[in-house]
Image: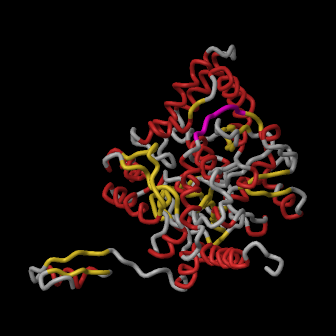
């Protein structure tokens, strides 16, 4: 109590309400207890002398990157993928633990590569271990939903002109029955073959003719136009067409192919997602490997596990069970039909977009559920667990405040607030495809796991500093 007339209320609002009812002034403090069992680790990490400067360095690295689309090419050439090599979304996983949609996408990918004639026959290949599985993130790549990348698939190539660093992502197939949602019907494979034979080469020629496309700049504009760059990319897709369509028309490719490509991209509001994702990864990869930094540089899901990576802990994954999203379902589908969360697309939230920028895209609630006030509140809440804001990506309705950027493991553990993710929902059975879209958070336990590792590293660094220049006994 600060005076006879004024009270500071901490935590639950019930007592503060009672005091206000007696005409006394109340200052409410939104305090939450830390996640259970994290108290000692929070103290250890807070005492790390490197932490403040390390986080400032990591955040500055993210904000300093600009992503440009510089090329498009087959994964065999761009990523060096060989026959029988498959990339997938999320942390590492084997066929034995793979979810239905991931299995479906891998089976379809095997048929696409000619390893089997019928996708149903592909399970034996993966059970025998005669093909390899590797996370997209391990090849500087991201993949939406199942995230399966095979050698013949074409990928976008994004580059930061200041450093020459590059990231990659496949071309977006659209919604519904598509490979990334685990579908592998003949029409799914036919579409992918057309994308490899017609769309990919046409986009490559257009990008090379028109010059690099400023993807970061498009992201800046689309946030002002009602997109949040995860589940709403309508403005971004149309701006990409604005930049590339003249070169596509002038390419010399038969007009029927150009028309089909323009119709496909223009009719697929999610097409730009596959550029937003590698743009976010490019920025976050710049912050990897900063000793002492508690900033999250990746969140990813494989349909079984949800994993995060942290700047100060290298390439180590901290995992927990993927969660089932809460949202809206297509047709007669319901929660019993949905697979737990899947995909690398949470890289957008990791960079401050998607669920973190819901306030800039109120119309998104019609796709993922919730209400407009919920969207505004979500963005405000994400500011409580991040290190700063992105002045390039701003939110008009919040007086052009920058999106919350740089998820801080310590702030998540200290407040118990989990990152909010907008997501699509894949059917749990291989071959079904998309069943809905909604909202989800990571499993809470991944953040205490990362915090414990940060505390171990902080203790090691403290021992080394204490030893001084003579480290022979450390």
Residue 181, x across and y down, in percent: 63, 53
Q: Is residue 254 above or below residue 439?
A: above
Query: Residue lying farthest left?
Result: 23
- Tell me where residue 85 appears, x and y as whole percent: 84, 51
Residue for point 73% across, 59% down: 103
Span colored in magenta: 66-72
Q: Is residue 381 visible?
A: yes
Q: Nearer the viewer, residue 461 or 321?
A: 461
- Answer yes or no: is residue 435 visible: no
Is 360 a magenta residue? no
What residue is drawn where x is 79% and y is 43%? 79
Name the colour scheme.
Answer: secondary structure
On the rendered structure, is 107 left or right of 462? right
Q: Position of residue 342 (x, y in %)?
A: 61, 60
User: Going 72% across and 42% down the picture, which residue do you hit?
Assistant: 189
Q: Position of residue 281 (x, y in %)?
A: 62, 49
Q: What is the quadrant of residue 375 in the picture?
A: bottom left
């Amino acid at each position: 109590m600060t005076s006879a007339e004024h009270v500071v209320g901490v935590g639950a609002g019930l007592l503060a309400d009672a005091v206000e009812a007696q005409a006394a002034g109340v200052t409410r403090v939104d305090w939450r207890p830390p996640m259970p069992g994290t108290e000692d680790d929070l103290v250890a990490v807070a005492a790390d002398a490197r932490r403040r400067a390390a986080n400032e360095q990591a955040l500055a690295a993210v904000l300093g990157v600009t992503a440009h689309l510089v090329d498009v090419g087959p994964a065999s050439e761009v990523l060096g993928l060989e026959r029988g090599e498959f990339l997938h979304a999320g942390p590492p996983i084997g066929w034995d633990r793979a979810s239905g949609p991931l299995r479906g996408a891998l089976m379809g990918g095997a048929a696409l590569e000619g390893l089997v004639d019928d996708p149903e026959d592909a399970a034996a290949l993966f059970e025998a271990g005669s093909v390899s599985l590797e996370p997209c993130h391990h090849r500087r790549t991201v993949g939406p939903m199942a995230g399966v990348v095979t050698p013949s698939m074409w990928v976008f190539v994004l580059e930061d002109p200041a450093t020459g660093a590059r990231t990659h992502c496949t071309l977006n197939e659209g919604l519904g029955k598509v490979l990334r949602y685990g579908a592998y019907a003949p029409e799914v494979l036919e579409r992918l073959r057309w994308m490899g034979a017609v769309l990919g080469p046409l986009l490559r020629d257009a990008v090379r003719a028109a010059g690099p496309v400023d993807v970061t700049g498009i992201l800046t504009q689309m946030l002002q136009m009602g997109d949040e760059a995860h589940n709403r990319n309508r403005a971004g897709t149309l701006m990409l067409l604005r930049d590339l369509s003249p070169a596509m028309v002038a390419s010399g490719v038969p007009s029927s192919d150009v028309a089909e490509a323009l119709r496909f991209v223009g009719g697929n509001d999610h097409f730009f997602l596959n550029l937003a994702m590698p743009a976010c990864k490019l920025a976050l990869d710049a912050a990897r490997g900063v000793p002492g930094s508690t900033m999250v540089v990746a969140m990813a899901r494989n349909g079984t596990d949800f994993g995060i990576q942290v700047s100060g802990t290298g390439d180590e994954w901290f995992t927990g069970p993927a969660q089932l999203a809460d949202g809206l379902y297509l047709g007669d589908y319901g929660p019993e039909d949905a697979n737990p969360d899947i995909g690398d697309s949470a890289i957008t939230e990791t960079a401050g977009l998607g669920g973190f920028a819901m306030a800039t895209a109120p119309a998104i609630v019609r796709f993922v559920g919730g209400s407009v006030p919920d969207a505004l509140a979500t963005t405000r809440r994400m500011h409580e667990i991040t290190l700063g804001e992105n002045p390039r990506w701003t939110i008009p309705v919040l007086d052009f405040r920058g999106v919350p950027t740089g998820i801080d493991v310590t702030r998540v553990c200290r407040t118990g607030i989990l990152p909010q993710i907008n997501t699509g929902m894949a059917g749990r059975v291989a071959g079904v495809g998309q069943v809905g879209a909604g909202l989800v958070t990571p499993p809470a336990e991944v953040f205490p796991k990362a915090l414990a590792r940060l505390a171990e590293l902080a203790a090691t660094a403290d021992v080394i500093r204490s030893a001084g220049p003579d480290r022979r006994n450390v």
